[in-house]
Amino acid sequence: MTVTKASARPRWAAGAAIIGRVVLAAGGGYAVAALATALLSVTLPLPRAEAVTTATLLSFAILAGVAVVVFALRSLRRAGAVVLGLILALGAGLWLAAGPLIRAGGAS
């Protein structure tokens, strides 16, 4: 296989892409897992302590899943778009589900 100069990628670009994926997997995965935990804690039909515990346990799998998706997608831009979409969707769901609780100063 012959690599032409026009199609060759500089070494620093490949390294930057890997570093970008690591940062996106860690930071974006944490944000998605935190929002999913909050949303599940509010919406699971369980007593509060059990809902929070279940949501927290699921957050570890969610974080790992986001990391796998970030490294599985073809480009860093696409991975960033997927993570941003998840963050926006979960944030909107949390705002809709817990909006009355937030405006009332928390659940009693």
Image: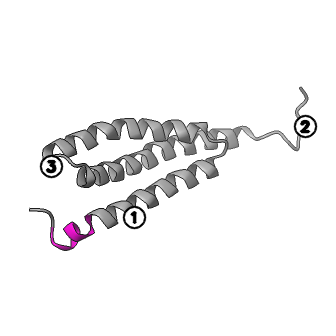
Circles 3 and 1 in contact, beta carbons < 8 Å? no
Tag of residue 34:
none
Q: CA distance from mark 2 to mark 3?
A: 60 Å
Mark 3 element type: helix
Q: Position of residue 41 (x, y in %)?
A: 24, 50
Circles 2 and 3 in contact, beta carbons < 8 Å? no
Q: Nearer the viewer, residue 83 or 14?
A: 83
95 in the magenta segment: no
Q: Label 1 belongs to which residue?
A: 92
* Mark found first going from the N terminus, 2 or 1: 2
Q: Residues within 10 Å of mark 1 (few under 14, many from 20)?
A: some
Residue drawn at the location 60% of the way across and 37% of the way down: 72
2 or 3: mark nearer the eye: 3
Q: Nearer the viewer, residue 1 or 79?
A: 79
- Count up the numbered dots: 3
Mark 2 element type: loop
Q: Position of residue 15 (x, y in %)?
A: 63, 38
What residue type is disc 1 on?
Answer: Ala
* Mark found first going from the N terminus, 2 or 3: 2
Q: Label 2 belongs to which residue?
A: 4
Q: CA distance from mark 2 to mark 1?
A: 47 Å
What residue type is disc 3 on?
Answer: Arg
Say whether residue 15 is left or right of residue 40.
right
The image quadrant that residue 73 belongs to is top right
Q: Label 3 belongs to which residue?
A: 48
Magenta stretch: helix, strand or loop mostly: helix
Magenta segment, which residues?
98-105
